[in-house]
Amino acid sequence: MLNKSIKESEDVLFKLGHELAHAYDKDRGFDFTSTSLGGLPSSEINGVRFENYLRAQDGESRMRLNYTFGGTNYNLRSSFDGNSAGYFNSYIAPLGRNEVYKRISPINQFNPNIDNTYVRKPVLYRVYDTKKKSFVSFD
Ligand SMILES: [Zn+2]
């Protein structure tokens, strides 16, 4: 990548992100046989969505809204609820099979022996696997 411009290098990173989205789908048990828009593998929509998330996070204003598969160019506009960088910027990775968000309310602390301060701990949300009965670690 040394001879490439910064722009070209970023494009490569967006493409890598697209492939990582596929790995994420595979890891989460996404159904790779499902298709959208009359023949496009649905996993490609997830890949482009994540690509656009990376573009938006990087400050780009132009999002990718098409994908060519099997010689057909698919317009993805109808696959997303929005087409703007702001829309893709707010993308949250979808939950996998058996996963739900669980609210964790840490016990607030009172420090009478130190300085009498009352420490309110923030509520946390974590991904919980209902089959394994444990929180999902992203470490
Ligand atoms: Zn792909």
Image (cartoon, rainbow, N blue to C red):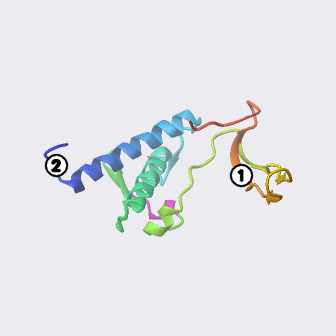
x 57%, y 54%: residue: 92
**For this view, does 46 lie left or right of residue 137?**
left
x 69%, y 46%: residue: 126
Q: Say the numbered circle drawn on residue 90.
A: none
Badge 2: how crowded within 10 Å, few (<14), some, or many (20+)? Answer: few
Residue hosting label 2 = 4
Residue 16 in sight here: yes
Query: Which secondary structure lies at badge 2?
Result: loop
What's the residue type where badge 2 is placed? Lys
Q: Nearer the observer, disc 1 or disc 2?
A: 1
x 34%, y 44%: residue: 70
Query: Which secondary structure lies at badge 1?
Result: strand
Residue hosting label 1 = 124
In depth, the one of 30 and 69 nearer the eye is 30
User: Does 99 appear in magenta?
Assistant: no
Alpha carbons under labels 1 and 2: distance apart:
42 Å
What's the residue type where badge 1 is placed? Leu
x 35%, y 50%: residue: 14
Residue 69 in sight here: no
Residue 58 percent coordinates (x, y): 37, 59
Residue 122 percent coordinates (x, y): 73, 56
Farthest left residue in view = 3
Residue 50 percent coordinates (x, y): 45, 52
User: Does residue 8 lie above or below 27 as drawn?
Assistant: below
